[in-house]
Image (spheres, rainbow, N blue to C red):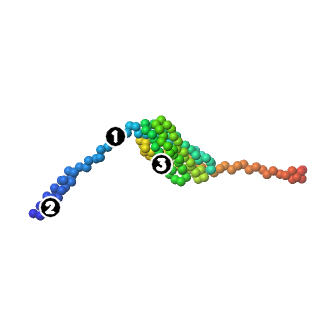
Amino acid sequence: MKKTCLILFALLAFGILTQAQETAPPTQPENPNVPVIAFESETIDYGTIERGADGNREFVFKNDGKEPLIISNCKGSCGCTVPTCPKEPILPGQTGKIKVKYDTNRMGSFTKTVTVRSNAKTPAKYLKIKGNVIAKKAEPATPPVQKKAEQTADQ
């Protein structure tokens, strides 16, 4: 009798648990006015540059949305890539710039990422910089200038 009651109770509990449905929270409709960040290019190719060359470049973007674009954070993938983002909101239709400085004292090929976080429709954008840093070309050696006294003695 105890076993039968225990089995019936277990089946009843199982039936109740399987009938309990979790309802999904209501989804909010997508905001049609949300800012849209559109970059002219999401990749900057430094090409082949010499060590110590100017490592400053800019990503240009436009707010194609209907609300102000607020960039909350810009971060390089390593300490050799330092981005600077605008602090003020970018109004609809306006353009902005994200400045990037790469440490060109590091030799060799590189590919780095800059992560941009904002209130845009796509909240995280991943920009890329790439290139190759080579040693400076040796300057041609100039021959030493002989003194006039030495020149006249040789004649």
Q: Pick the residue in front: 3 or 28.
A: 28
Q: Residue at x 55, y 52 (%)?
A: 80
- For residue 135, the mark is none
In-image side of 48 versus 39 (left or right): right
Helix, strand or loop at disc 3? strand
In-image side of 54 versus 10 (left or right): right
Which of the two labelled residues, at mark 1 and mark 3, occupies the earlier sequence position?
A: 1
Which of the two labelled residues, at mark 2 and mark 1, occupies the earlier sequence position?
A: 2
Q: Circle 3 sits on which residue?
A: 73
Q: Residues within 10 Å of mark 2 (few under 14, many from 20)?
A: few
Q: Circle 1 sits on which residue?
A: 29
Rounded to the nearest angstrom, the CA distance separating label 2 from label 1 is: 48 Å
Rounded to the nearest angstrom, the CA distance separating label 1 from label 3 is: 26 Å
Q: Circle 2 sits on which residue?
A: 6
Q: Is residue 4 visible?
A: yes
Rounded to the nearest angstrom, the CA distance separating label 2 from label 3 is: 59 Å
